[in-house]
């Protein structure tokens, strides 16, 4: 089982293949997921310290670009745990003053479970313009 390290919240064994947002929550961390894991809200954002995946879903790419967050953060609802990772969740229920983290994200990645290298997404976008 991969080790998930969470800044200031210890190291945890987590099941490989699960969505990172769910893995973080399973460690008792109150990470936000206000859109229910659909790449719309960005409240599941994390800063990667180690183990950042090279690939991302188109939905993550487009949302981060729209919010001018590309290269700054990643959306944990769009990432699957495949190896050791160290992350810092950036929007937590207790810090944001929310009543709850949001609807439970589905087990599988939504809206699309296909990942592309970031360069490929950039290339596709420049061809579309
Ligand atoms: S973008 Fe809303 S939970 Fe990930």
Image (cartoon, rainbow, N blue to C red):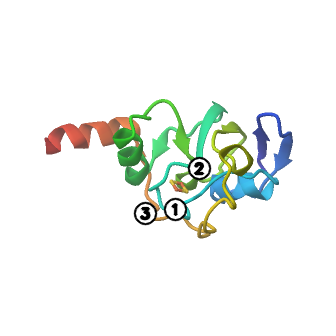
Q: Secondary structure at mark 2?
A: loop
Pointer 1 residue Cβ closer than 8 Å to ligand 1: yes
Q: Which residue is identified by label 3?
A: 112
Q: Position of residue 51 (x, y in %)?
A: 64, 35
Pointer 2 residue Cβ closer than 8 Å to ligand 1: yes
Observer-nearest of 27 and 66: 66
Q: Which residue is identified by label 1?
A: 35
Q: Position of residue 118 (x, y in %)?
A: 39, 38
Question: Closer to us: mark 3 or mark 1?
Answer: 1
- Left-right relation of 6 to 116: right
Q: Position of residue 57 (x, y in %)?
A: 43, 51
Q: Which residue is identified by label 2?
A: 44
Q: Is disc 2 surrounded by few (<14), some (14 to 19) or many (20+) residues within 10 Å?
A: many
Observer-nearest of 112 and 120: 112
Question: Closer to us: mark 3 or mark 2?
Answer: 2
- Left-right relation of 62 to 34: left
Q: Quadrant of the C terminus?
A: top left
Q: Is disc 3 surrounded by few (<14), some (14 to 19) or many (20+) residues within 10 Å?
A: some
Numbered disc total? 3
The Cα atoms of the two marked residues, 3 and 2, are separated by: 17 Å
Q: Secondary structure at mark 3?
A: loop
- First-in-chain label (2 vs 1): 1
- First-in-chain label (3 vs 1): 1
Query: What residue appears at the point 53 percent right and 41 percent down from the top-left corner?
Result: 74
Label placed on residue 57 = none
Query: What residue appears at the point 46 percent right and 46 percent down from the top-left corner?
Result: 56
Q: Secondary structure at mark 1?
A: loop
């Amino acid at each position: 089982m991969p080790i998930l390290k969470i800044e200031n919240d210890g190291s945890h064994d987590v099941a490989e293949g699960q969505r990172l947002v769910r893995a973080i929550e399973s460690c008792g961390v109150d990470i936000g997921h206000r859109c229910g894991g659909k790449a719309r809200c960005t409240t599941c954002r994390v800063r990667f310290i180690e183990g950042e995946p090279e690939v991302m879903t188109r939905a993550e790419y487009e949302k981060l670009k729209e919010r001018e967050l590309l290269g700054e953060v990643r959306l944990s609802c769009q990432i699957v745990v495949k190896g050791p990772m160290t992350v810092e969740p950036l929007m937590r229920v207790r810090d944001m003053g929310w009543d709850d983290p949001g609807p439970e994200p589905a087990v599988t990645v939504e809206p699309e479970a296909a990942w592309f290298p970031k360069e490929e997404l950039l290339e596709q976008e420049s061809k579309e313009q």
